[in-house]
Amino acid sequence: MSNKLAGRLLFLCLCVSGFAVLAQSQTTHPTLNITQVEFTLPPGGSQTFTLPNVPGAIRIEISSPSSNHGTQEPSELMWALVNWDNGPEGSEQITWIGTNSDGTTLGSNSVQSTTIASIFGAPTTLTVSDAATGTLEVTRSSAGTIINGNYIVRMYY
């Protein structure tokens, strides 16, 4: 009888210690910051914004809701996951994985390229304007459109 009790206690101890290790390895971040910027660009216009000074990755979503009651082909969205390597020991460069409006993706960095992502229907690009200051730029091309474009930029960090 004591062997059965000892076996059950050993099993219980192993289970409890396993849950304790699992609980210690999880981290939670109770605060999710969201910054939203809205603006209108004429054909050939651009707007800059600065990345938040945070140590981790930043998700950027850019939508261009249609202002002519139509639907842009293939979509009105582009997004990117970016990392700004700033700070006293940082390289002051930006790395990213960008997704274009047609779903194609590109990973790169500000040493090799400046184009992060594009919306193809009304030609719009998200580019690195100044990596050292974490400044990005949304530019609406004057080719292929004569109407202003409305943009919503959301950053999650």
Image: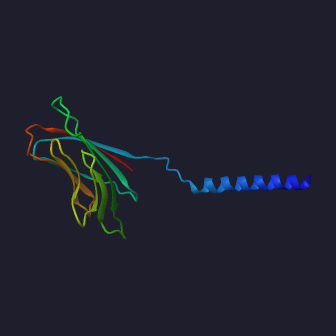
Q: Give left or right: position of 99 versus 25.
A: left
Quadrant for residue 21, please give it: bottom right
Quadrant for residue 65, please give it: top left
Quadrant for residue 143, please give it: top left
Q: What residue is shown at x 16% (from left), y 39% (from top)?
A: 149
Q: What residue is shown at x 35% (from left), y 68% (from top)?
A: 90
Percent across and percent down for residue 142 are: 8, 45
Residue at the extreme right = 1
Percent across and percent down for residue 138 are: 20, 49
Percent across and percent down for residue 3 are: 88, 56
Percent across and percent down for residue 150 are: 19, 38
Does residue 113 lie above or below 76 as drawn? Answer: below
Q: What residue is shown at x 22% (from left), y 62% (from top)?
A: 113
Q: What residue is shown at x 27% (from left), y 50% (from top)?
A: 104
Residue at the extreme top = 69
Q: Give left or right: position of 59 versus 63.
A: right
